[in-house]
C-alpha cells in the first residue's frame, strides 16, 4: 500500500522515505510487545489495541506540528523480527531526518516513536491479570535501547513522566 501525499501540501519526503517514517513507530511498538510474553493472548491483544491508538494519536500530533501526514498503514513486517528491523531502520530514519528536517521536528519524531513504544510497554502489566508492574524489566531495557538507537536518551525520561501524568488525569 502506498502512502498518501501530505494533506497540507507537497511533502519533503519521497514515498519510500515516508514509508520508513510511518513504519518505525509500528516497529518500536511491535518490538516492545514481542520482548515480553507475559500475559499471553490477553496481553498481546491489549498491546495491539494500544499500538494502533498510540500511533494514530502520535501521528495526529506530528501532523499538526510539521504538516507531514503520516497517517497511513505501515509497510508489512514480521512481528517476530520487529526488533531486528527496528534497529536496522533507526539509522536510516535518523540520517533521513537530519538531511531534511529541523532539530525540533527531529526531536518531536523521536518522541513520537518513544511514546508509542512506552504506551505498548505500559499496556499490560505483570502478575495476575496484568495488575502488577506496568513496564517489565525486559520492556524497560528495550525502551532504553530504542532511545539509544534514536540518539534520544535525553527524551526518554520526559516520555515516561508524561505517560505517568496522563494516567493521573
Image: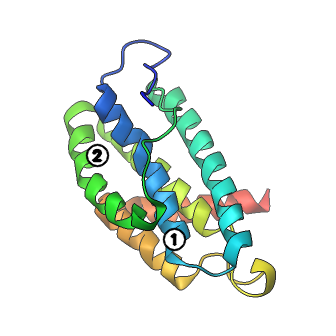
Q: Contact, CB < 8 Å: mark 1 with mark 2?
A: no
In the displayed structure, 147 sits above or below 52; it is: below
Q: Which residue is mark 2?
A: 93
- Tell me what residue is drawn at x 30 percent, y 22 percent: 12
- Tell me what residue is drawn at x 42 percent, y 42 percent: 75
- Using the rendered image of the protein, determine whether residue 105 is visible from the camera's viewpoint: no
**Number of labelled discs?**
2
Residue 113 lies, in percent from the top left, at: 46, 52
Mark 2 residue element: helix
In the displayed structure, 40 sits above or below 163; it is: below
Looking at the figure, which quarter contains the C terminus? bottom right
Looking at the figure, which quarter contains the N terminus? top left
- Tell me what residue is drawn at x 55 percent, y 68 percent: 33
Residue 166 lies, in percent from the top left, at: 71, 57
User: Which of the labelled discs sits on residue 34, or is there none?
Assistant: 1
Local crowd size for mark 1, using a 10 Å CA cut-off: few (<14), some (14–19), many (≥20): some
Amino acid at each position: 500500500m502506498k502512502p498518501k501525499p501530505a494533506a497540507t501540501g507537497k511533502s519533503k519526503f519521497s514515498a519510500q522515505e515516508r514509508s520508513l517514517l510511518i513504519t518505525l513507530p509500528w516497529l518500536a511498538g511491535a518490538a516492545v510487545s514481542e520482548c515480553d510474553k507475559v500475559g499471553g493472548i490477553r496481553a498481546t491483544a491489549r498491546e495491539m489495541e494500544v499500538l494502533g491508538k498510540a500511533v494514530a494519536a502520535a501521528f495526529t500530533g506530528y501532523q499538526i506540528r510539521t504538516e507531514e501526514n503520516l497517517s497511513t498503514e505501515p509497510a508489512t513486517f514480521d512481528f517476530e523480527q520487529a526488533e531486528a528491523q527496528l534497529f536496522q531502520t533507526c539509522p536510516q530514519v535518523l540520517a533521513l531526518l537530519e538531511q531534511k528536517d529541523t532539530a525540533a521536528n527531529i526531536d518531536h519524531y523521536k518522541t513520537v516513536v518513544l511514546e508509542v513504544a512506552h504506551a505498548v510497554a505500559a499496556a499490560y502489566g505483570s502478575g495476575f491479570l496484568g495488575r502488577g508492574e506496568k513496564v517489565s524489566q525486559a520492556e524497560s531495557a528495550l525502551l532504553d535501547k530504542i532511545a539509544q538507537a534514536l540518539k534520544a536518551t535525553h527524551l526518554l525520561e520526559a516520555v515516561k513522566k508524561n505517560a505517568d501524568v496522563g494516567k493521573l488525569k
